[in-house]
Amino acid sequence: MKRFAELFNAKFGDATLDDDEREAAAEVAQRESNIASALAAANPANTAEQLAEFAKIDSDFVVDEVVQHPNTATATLVGLAGRDPVVALTAARRPDAPPEFLAECAGSSYPNVRATIAGHPSTPVATLRELSREDDPDIQRALAANSSTPIAALKRLADGSGTIAATAAWRRLRDLRA
């Protein structure tokens, strides 16, 4: 904010702002600060500790960069995912999502987060077994399509009568036998 005030005064002199103008100027300054922080968070040389500090900034721009950064620690991802289901989805969609993170977030109260985790190839087998007990069709379809889903879980899914997930699980089992 101080930098914004300096730039403003250099350009416009000692012009006075009313409350609405001052609030608008503060919002612009905050948005610019968040964008600068997001750019800094995206630096590939950032350490896990630095990214944990960036994660404390209350900005969607910054959080998005931290969640997608390959050096972000599992604990940081879990903390961010607990604050917002969209963040959990973004992190769970990372191809390099840590298995520990996926296992931790499999208990999310949001079915779409659990379905994404059920379909992730890095989800631990024990977590896939737990998810296979759920009745949610999206979770079942994701499990049936996941090449990491254990045979016992596929058999449980294949026992479902006439569901898309049951058909997909049956096909996977058939292909495994071939």
Image (cartoon, grey):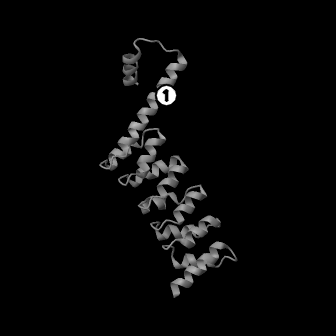
Q: Residue 118 occupies which quadrant of the picture?
A: bottom right
Which residue occupies the extreme right position in the image?
Answer: 162
Tell me residue 123's x, y (percent).
Answer: 47, 66
Which residue occupies the extreme front position in the image?
Answer: 11
In the displayed structure, 126 sits above or below 78; it is below
Residue drawn at x 64%, y 66% as measured from the top left: 137
- Is residue 170 left or right of 150 when viewed as pictured? right
In the displayed structure, 8 sits above or below 173; it is above
In the displayed structure, 11 sits above or below 85; it is above
- Residue at disc 1, secondary structure: helix
Q: Residue 122 occupies which quadrant of the picture?
A: bottom left
Tell me residue 117's x, y (percent).
Answer: 52, 62
In the displayed structure, 171 sits above or below 67; it is below
Neighbourhood count class around disc 1 (C-alpha, 10 Å): few under 14, some 14–19, many 20 upward: few
Please name the amino acid that badge 1 sits on. Answer: Glu
**Residue nearer the viewer, 126 or 3:** 3
**Residue nearer the viewer, 170 or 56:** 170
Q: Which residue is mark 1?
A: 27
Residue drawn at x 56%, y 84% as measured from the top left: 174
